[in-house]
Amino acid sequence: MTAAPDPQPSWRKPAGIALILLLIVAWATIVVALSPWVGTWPVLVQGLFYLVAGIVWILPLKPLLRWMELGRWRG
């Protein structure tokens, strides 16, 4: 009995990695562009803003990772 040949790597994984990197760069650019206004806020409000901004960018990752693995956006 012979082993099945290894499947060809999917183009979705490198494309997904590129999209993740693009998402990070775009989100960081938006947050940096807002920093002159955010810098005028009270320190605790700034901290809350940056905490939320540091977490929110993760939300689109779940469907993107699912697409990379399975080839569809929804479960």
Image: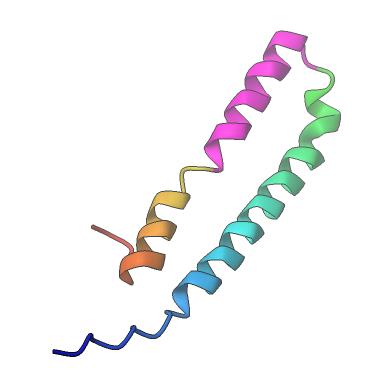
| Quadrant of residue 75 within the rendered picture | bottom left
**Is residue 53 in view?**
yes
- Picture coordinates of residue 53 (x, y %)? 62, 33
In the displayed structure image, the side of residue 75 where residue 43 appears, left or right: right
| Quadrant of residue 14 within the rendered picture | bottom right
* Residue range corresponding to the magenta coloring: 41-57
- Picture coordinates of residue 56 (x, y %)? 54, 37
- Picture coordinates of residue 18 (x, y %)? 61, 67
- Picture coordinates of residue 9 (x, y %)? 43, 80
- Identify which residue, 56 or 17, lies in the foreground: 17
Is 49 situated above or below 18? above
Outermost residue, left direction? 1
Is 61 situated above or below 3? above
- Identify which residue, 74 or 36, lies in the foreground: 74
* Residue located at (33% from left, 72% from top): 71
Does the segment drawn in magenta span residue 67?
A: no
| Quadrant of residue 69 within the rendered picture | bottom left
**Is residue 72 in view?**
no
Is 7 situated above or below 24? below
* Residue located at (84% from left, 18% from top): 40
In the displayed structure image, the side of residue 53 where residue 73 appears, left or right: left
- Identify which residue, 27 or 42, lies in the foreground: 27
* Residue located at (51% from left, 43% from top): 58
Q: Main secondary structure of the magenta part?
A: helix
Colour treatment of the image: rainbow
